[in-house]
Image (cartoon, rainbow, N blue to C red):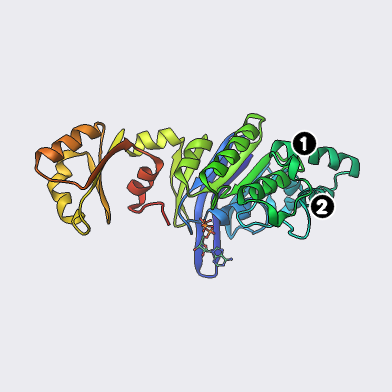
Amino acid sequence: MISARGLRKSFGDFEAVRGIDVSVRPGVAFGFLGPNGAGKSSTMRMICCVSPPSGGELRVFGMDPAKDGPKIKARLGVCPQEDTLDVELNVYDNLYVYGRYFGLPRAEVKGRIDELLDFVQLTDKAKAKVDDLSGGMKRRLTIARSLINRPEILVLDEPTTGLDPQARHVIWDRLFRLKQAGVTLLLTTHYMDEAEQLCDELVVMDQGRIVAHGTPLGLIQQHSTREVAELRFGVGEHEALAAKVEDLAERIEVLPDRLLLYSDDGEAVIDAVHSRDLSPVATLVRRSSLEDVFLHLTGRTLVD
Ligand SMILES: Nc1ncnc2c1ncn2[C@@H]1O[C@H](COP(=O)(O)OP(=O)(O)OP(=O)(O)O)[C@@H](O)[C@H]1O
Protein backbone atom coordinates (compact mmCIF):
# COMPACT_ATOMS: atom_id res chain seq x y z
CA MET A 1 0.00 0.00 0.00
CA ILE A 2 2.85 2.33 0.88
CA SER A 3 6.53 2.06 0.22
CA ALA A 4 9.21 4.60 1.14
CA ARG A 5 12.92 4.29 0.48
CA GLY A 6 15.36 6.83 1.90
CA LEU A 7 12.47 9.28 2.36
CA ARG A 8 13.55 12.76 3.49
CA LYS A 9 11.90 16.03 4.45
CA SER A 10 13.83 19.23 5.10
CA PHE A 11 12.68 22.65 6.19
CA GLY A 12 15.52 24.94 5.21
CA ASP A 13 18.66 23.52 6.82
CA PHE A 14 16.65 21.41 9.25
CA GLU A 15 16.04 17.77 8.38
CA ALA A 16 12.77 16.64 9.98
CA VAL A 17 12.80 13.20 8.26
CA ARG A 18 16.26 11.78 7.62
CA GLY A 19 16.01 8.96 5.13
CA ILE A 20 13.43 6.43 6.31
CA ASP A 21 12.40 3.09 4.78
CA VAL A 22 8.83 1.94 5.34
CA SER A 23 6.67 -0.71 3.75
CA VAL A 24 2.99 -1.03 4.65
CA ARG A 25 1.03 -4.13 3.61
CA PRO A 26 -2.75 -4.11 3.00
CA GLY A 27 -5.00 -4.59 6.02
CA VAL A 28 -2.46 -3.92 8.76
CA ALA A 29 -2.58 -1.24 11.41
CA PHE A 30 0.80 0.38 11.05
CA GLY A 31 2.03 2.80 13.70
CA PHE A 32 4.63 5.54 13.91
CA LEU A 33 5.54 5.86 17.58
CA GLY A 34 7.76 8.66 18.80
CA PRO A 35 7.95 11.83 20.87
CA ASN A 36 6.90 15.29 19.70
CA GLY A 37 9.14 16.48 16.91
CA ALA A 38 10.25 12.96 15.84
CA GLY A 39 9.07 13.59 12.27
CA LYS A 40 5.86 11.54 12.35
CA SER A 41 3.50 14.25 11.07
CA SER A 42 5.99 15.31 8.40
CA THR A 43 6.04 11.69 7.16
CA MET A 44 2.24 11.49 7.18
CA ARG A 45 1.95 14.74 5.25
CA MET A 46 4.18 13.36 2.51
CA ILE A 47 2.14 10.15 2.33
CA CYS A 48 -1.07 12.20 2.17
CA CYS A 49 0.34 14.18 -0.79
CA VAL A 50 0.17 17.54 1.00
CA SER A 51 3.92 18.04 1.40
CA PRO A 52 6.44 17.00 -1.27
CA PRO A 53 9.39 14.83 -0.19
CA SER A 54 12.81 16.52 -0.20
CA GLY A 55 14.47 13.27 -1.23
CA GLY A 56 14.11 9.51 -1.54
CA GLU A 57 11.33 7.52 -3.14
CA LEU A 58 7.70 7.31 -2.08
CA ARG A 59 4.89 5.23 -3.57
CA VAL A 60 1.30 5.11 -2.32
CA PHE A 61 -0.90 2.46 -3.99
CA GLY A 62 2.09 2.06 -6.28
CA MET A 63 1.73 5.67 -7.47
CA ASP A 64 4.02 8.67 -7.12
CA PRO A 65 2.46 11.48 -4.99
CA ALA A 66 4.25 14.07 -7.13
CA LYS A 67 2.42 12.86 -10.26
CA ASP A 68 -0.75 11.21 -9.02
CA GLY A 69 -1.69 13.19 -5.88
CA PRO A 70 -5.43 13.49 -6.71
CA LYS A 71 -5.74 9.76 -7.57
CA ILE A 72 -4.03 8.82 -4.30
CA LYS A 73 -6.08 11.28 -2.23
CA ALA A 74 -9.32 9.84 -3.63
CA ARG A 75 -8.43 6.50 -2.02
CA LEU A 76 -7.16 7.90 1.31
CA GLY A 77 -8.99 9.03 4.43
CA VAL A 78 -7.21 11.60 6.54
CA CYS A 79 -7.89 12.38 10.17
CA PRO A 80 -5.59 15.27 11.08
CA GLN A 81 -4.17 16.04 14.50
CA GLU A 82 -5.77 19.47 14.77
CA ASP A 83 -9.52 19.86 14.81
CA THR A 84 -10.63 21.02 11.34
CA LEU A 85 -14.39 20.61 11.68
CA ASP A 86 -16.57 23.48 10.46
CA VAL A 87 -18.07 25.05 13.60
CA GLU A 88 -20.62 26.99 11.53
CA LEU A 89 -22.23 23.72 10.48
CA ASN A 90 -23.98 21.02 12.47
CA VAL A 91 -22.75 17.42 12.66
CA TYR A 92 -24.75 16.18 9.67
CA ASP A 93 -23.78 19.11 7.45
CA ASN A 94 -20.09 18.68 8.22
CA LEU A 95 -20.36 15.24 6.68
CA TYR A 96 -22.65 16.36 3.86
CA VAL A 97 -20.29 19.11 2.66
CA TYR A 98 -17.37 16.69 2.72
CA GLY A 99 -19.28 14.01 0.84
CA ARG A 100 -20.26 16.45 -1.89
CA TYR A 101 -16.66 17.69 -2.02
CA PHE A 102 -15.62 14.11 -2.78
CA GLY A 103 -18.15 14.10 -5.59
CA LEU A 104 -20.64 11.67 -4.05
CA PRO A 105 -24.12 12.05 -5.59
CA ARG A 106 -26.73 13.70 -3.32
CA ALA A 107 -28.75 10.49 -2.81
CA GLU A 108 -25.71 8.41 -2.04
CA VAL A 109 -24.19 10.87 0.41
CA LYS A 110 -27.28 10.80 2.63
CA GLY A 111 -27.19 7.02 2.98
CA ARG A 112 -23.47 7.13 3.64
CA ILE A 113 -23.90 9.76 6.37
CA ASP A 114 -26.56 7.68 8.16
CA GLU A 115 -24.22 4.69 8.03
CA LEU A 116 -21.26 6.70 9.36
CA LEU A 117 -23.20 8.44 12.13
CA ASP A 118 -24.33 5.03 13.28
CA PHE A 119 -20.75 3.70 13.10
CA VAL A 120 -19.32 6.52 15.25
CA GLN A 121 -22.37 6.50 17.55
CA LEU A 122 -23.44 10.06 16.80
CA THR A 123 -26.86 9.46 15.20
CA ASP A 124 -28.64 11.32 17.99
CA LYS A 125 -26.26 14.28 17.57
CA ALA A 126 -26.91 14.76 13.85
CA LYS A 127 -28.43 18.21 14.34
CA ALA A 128 -26.08 19.31 17.14
CA LYS A 129 -23.62 22.15 16.69
CA VAL A 130 -19.98 21.08 16.55
CA ASP A 131 -19.20 23.39 19.48
CA ASP A 132 -21.63 21.49 21.68
CA LEU A 133 -19.83 18.15 21.19
CA SER A 134 -17.32 16.72 23.66
CA GLY A 135 -13.70 16.25 22.57
CA GLY A 136 -14.28 12.53 22.00
CA MET A 137 -17.41 13.19 19.89
CA LYS A 138 -15.53 15.73 17.77
CA ARG A 139 -12.80 13.21 17.14
CA ARG A 140 -15.39 10.56 16.21
CA LEU A 141 -17.02 13.02 13.81
CA THR A 142 -13.63 13.72 12.23
CA ILE A 143 -13.11 9.97 11.81
CA ALA A 144 -16.57 9.66 10.22
CA ARG A 145 -15.71 12.54 7.87
CA SER A 146 -12.46 10.86 6.85
CA LEU A 147 -14.38 7.68 5.96
CA ILE A 148 -16.92 9.31 3.67
CA ASN A 149 -15.13 8.20 0.48
CA ARG A 150 -14.67 4.59 1.70
CA PRO A 151 -10.88 4.92 1.86
CA GLU A 152 -8.59 1.93 1.53
CA ILE A 153 -6.06 3.56 3.86
CA LEU A 154 -7.09 5.67 6.84
CA VAL A 155 -4.36 7.99 8.10
CA LEU A 156 -4.76 9.12 11.70
CA ASP A 157 -2.38 11.66 13.20
CA GLU A 158 -2.44 11.28 17.00
CA PRO A 159 -6.07 10.01 17.04
CA THR A 160 -6.63 10.21 20.79
CA THR A 161 -4.35 13.00 21.98
CA GLY A 162 -6.10 15.16 24.56
CA LEU A 163 -8.98 12.73 25.18
CA ASP A 164 -9.91 11.14 28.49
CA PRO A 165 -9.40 7.37 28.94
CA GLN A 166 -13.03 6.44 28.26
CA ALA A 167 -13.19 8.49 25.06
CA ARG A 168 -9.89 6.96 23.93
CA HIS A 169 -11.27 3.45 24.39
CA VAL A 170 -14.36 4.25 22.31
CA ILE A 171 -12.10 5.47 19.48
CA TRP A 172 -9.86 2.40 19.76
CA ASP A 173 -12.93 0.19 19.50
CA ARG A 174 -14.11 1.95 16.32
CA LEU A 175 -10.63 1.77 14.77
CA PHE A 176 -10.42 -1.90 15.65
CA ARG A 177 -13.68 -2.49 13.77
CA LEU A 178 -12.35 -0.65 10.73
CA LYS A 179 -9.30 -2.86 10.82
CA GLN A 180 -11.53 -5.93 10.95
CA ALA A 181 -13.36 -4.57 7.91
CA GLY A 182 -10.06 -4.58 6.02
CA VAL A 183 -9.15 -0.88 6.12
CA THR A 184 -5.40 -0.30 6.34
CA LEU A 185 -4.68 2.02 9.27
CA LEU A 186 -1.70 4.29 9.41
CA LEU A 187 -1.39 6.11 12.67
CA THR A 188 1.01 8.26 14.60
CA THR A 189 1.02 8.28 18.35
CA HIS A 190 3.19 9.13 21.28
CA TYR A 191 1.08 6.91 23.53
CA MET A 192 2.66 3.52 23.97
CA ASP A 193 -0.61 1.97 25.17
CA GLU A 194 -2.28 3.10 21.95
CA ALA A 195 0.51 1.58 19.88
CA GLU A 196 0.28 -1.66 21.86
CA GLN A 197 -3.52 -1.83 21.58
CA LEU A 198 -3.94 -0.97 17.93
CA CYS A 199 -0.82 -1.62 15.91
CA ASP A 200 0.08 -4.90 14.23
CA GLU A 201 3.38 -3.40 13.21
CA LEU A 202 5.16 -0.21 14.11
CA VAL A 203 8.26 1.85 13.69
CA VAL A 204 9.78 3.79 16.54
CA MET A 205 10.89 7.23 15.32
CA ASP A 206 13.28 9.63 16.99
CA GLN A 207 14.81 12.80 15.59
CA GLY A 208 13.78 12.03 12.03
CA ARG A 209 15.05 8.45 11.99
CA ILE A 210 13.52 5.01 12.46
CA VAL A 211 15.28 3.47 15.45
CA ALA A 212 13.30 0.19 15.56
CA HIS A 213 10.71 -1.72 13.57
CA GLY A 214 8.58 -4.73 14.49
CA THR A 215 5.42 -5.88 16.22
CA PRO A 216 4.72 -4.34 19.65
CA LEU A 217 5.44 -7.64 21.42
CA GLY A 218 8.42 -8.42 19.23
CA LEU A 219 9.99 -5.05 19.99
CA ILE A 220 9.50 -5.55 23.72
CA GLN A 221 11.01 -9.03 23.56
CA GLN A 222 13.92 -7.83 21.47
CA HIS A 223 14.78 -4.67 23.37
CA SER A 224 13.69 -5.26 26.96
CA THR A 225 13.45 -7.86 29.71
CA ARG A 226 10.18 -9.50 30.77
CA GLU A 227 9.75 -7.34 33.88
CA VAL A 228 10.80 -4.00 35.31
CA ALA A 229 11.23 -3.22 39.00
CA GLU A 230 10.66 0.48 39.65
CA LEU A 231 12.26 1.94 42.77
CA ARG A 232 11.51 5.40 44.13
CA PHE A 233 13.86 6.93 46.68
CA GLY A 234 14.03 10.47 48.06
CA VAL A 235 14.35 13.41 45.68
CA GLY A 236 17.91 13.68 44.35
CA GLU A 237 19.01 10.25 45.67
CA HIS A 238 18.53 8.16 42.55
CA GLU A 239 21.84 8.83 40.85
CA ALA A 240 23.87 7.88 43.94
CA LEU A 241 21.77 4.81 44.80
CA ALA A 242 21.94 3.41 41.26
CA ALA A 243 25.51 2.22 41.89
CA LYS A 244 24.32 0.19 44.89
CA VAL A 245 21.69 -1.81 42.97
CA GLU A 246 22.89 -1.97 39.38
CA ASP A 247 24.35 -5.47 39.78
CA LEU A 248 20.87 -6.80 40.68
CA ALA A 249 19.46 -6.39 37.17
CA GLU A 250 20.42 -6.97 33.56
CA ARG A 251 20.13 -3.26 32.89
CA ILE A 252 19.34 -0.13 34.83
CA GLU A 253 17.90 3.24 33.81
CA VAL A 254 18.20 6.25 36.09
CA LEU A 255 15.32 8.72 35.79
CA PRO A 256 15.03 11.90 37.89
CA ASP A 257 12.25 10.40 40.02
CA ARG A 258 12.97 6.64 39.95
CA LEU A 259 15.29 3.79 39.07
CA LEU A 260 14.20 1.17 36.54
CA LEU A 261 15.78 -2.25 37.02
CA TYR A 262 15.30 -4.61 34.09
CA SER A 263 15.19 -8.36 34.71
CA ASP A 264 12.92 -11.35 34.12
CA ASP A 265 12.02 -11.54 37.82
CA GLY A 266 11.15 -8.13 39.27
CA GLU A 267 10.05 -9.45 42.69
CA ALA A 268 13.46 -11.08 43.19
CA VAL A 269 15.09 -7.72 42.44
CA ILE A 270 12.92 -5.94 45.02
CA ASP A 271 13.71 -8.64 47.64
CA ALA A 272 17.43 -8.21 46.95
CA VAL A 273 17.13 -4.40 47.31
CA HIS A 274 15.47 -4.81 50.72
CA SER A 275 18.12 -7.32 51.82
CA ARG A 276 20.72 -4.58 51.27
CA ASP A 277 18.97 -2.36 53.79
CA LEU A 278 18.06 0.18 51.17
CA SER A 279 14.62 1.61 51.85
CA PRO A 280 12.83 2.78 48.73
CA VAL A 281 9.84 5.06 49.34
CA ALA A 282 7.86 2.99 46.85
CA THR A 283 8.38 -0.07 44.67
CA LEU A 284 6.50 -1.50 41.74
CA VAL A 285 6.96 -4.53 39.49
CA ARG A 286 5.42 -4.37 36.02
CA ARG A 287 5.72 -5.89 32.56
CA SER A 288 8.08 -4.21 30.12
CA SER A 289 6.35 -1.86 27.68
CA LEU A 290 7.12 0.06 24.51
CA GLU A 291 8.07 3.00 26.75
CA ASP A 292 10.97 0.85 28.00
CA VAL A 293 11.92 0.00 24.43
CA PHE A 294 12.02 3.69 23.57
CA LEU A 295 14.05 4.53 26.66
CA HIS A 296 16.52 1.77 25.88
CA LEU A 297 16.93 2.85 22.26
CA THR A 298 17.12 6.61 22.77
CA GLY A 299 18.02 7.20 26.43
CA ARG A 300 14.89 9.35 26.75
CA THR A 301 11.28 8.81 27.81
CA LEU A 302 8.36 9.23 25.43
CA VAL A 303 6.63 11.62 27.82
CA ASP A 304 6.73 15.19 26.53
N1 LIG B 1 6.61 23.63 8.20
C1 LIG B 1 7.67 23.48 9.00
N2 LIG B 1 8.68 24.37 9.02
C2 LIG B 1 9.76 24.21 9.81
N3 LIG B 1 9.93 23.15 10.66
C3 LIG B 1 8.95 22.24 10.70
C4 LIG B 1 7.78 22.34 9.88
N4 LIG B 1 6.99 21.26 10.13
C5 LIG B 1 7.65 20.52 11.07
N5 LIG B 1 8.82 21.11 11.40
C6 LIG B 1 9.79 20.60 12.38
O1 LIG B 1 10.13 19.29 12.01
C7 LIG B 1 10.27 18.46 13.17
C8 LIG B 1 9.35 17.28 13.07
O2 LIG B 1 8.01 17.74 13.19
P1 LIG B 1 6.78 16.75 13.07
O3 LIG B 1 5.52 17.57 13.24
O4 LIG B 1 6.91 15.95 11.85
O5 LIG B 1 7.01 15.84 14.32
P2 LIG B 1 6.01 14.84 15.04
O6 LIG B 1 6.79 13.63 15.36
O7 LIG B 1 4.79 14.64 14.23
O8 LIG B 1 5.64 15.60 16.36
P3 LIG B 1 4.20 16.11 16.83
O9 LIG B 1 3.61 14.98 17.55
O10 LIG B 1 4.56 17.26 17.73
O11 LIG B 1 3.45 16.55 15.60
C9 LIG B 1 9.98 19.37 14.37
O12 LIG B 1 11.21 19.80 14.91
C10 LIG B 1 9.21 20.51 13.77
O13 LIG B 1 9.44 21.70 14.50
Q: Residue at left 57%, top 44%?
A: 167
- Specify whether 190 is left or right of 225: right
Q: Amino acid at mark 1?
A: Glu
Badge 1 is on which residue? 115
Where is residue 26? Give x, y as percent.
63, 34
- 16 or 122: nearer the viewer: 122
- In the figure, residue 51 lies in which quadrant? bottom right
Where is residue 62? Give x, y as percent.
67, 42
- Specify whether 203 is left or right of 291: right
Mark found first going from the N terminus, 2 or 1: 2
Where is residue 95? Give x, y as percent.
78, 48
Q: Amino acid at mark 2?
A: Val
Mark 2 touching mark 1, by CB under 8 A? no
Query: Distance between the Cα atoms at labels 2 and 1?
Result: 16 Å
Q: How many labels were placed on the picture?
A: 2
Q: Residues within 10 Å of mark 1 (few under 14, many from 20)?
A: some
Q: Residue at left 36%, top 52%?
A: 298
- 133 or 188: nearer the viewer: 133
* Quadrant of the frame with the N terminus: top right
* Quadrant of the frame with the C terminus: bottom left
Any mark on residue 97, and which? 2
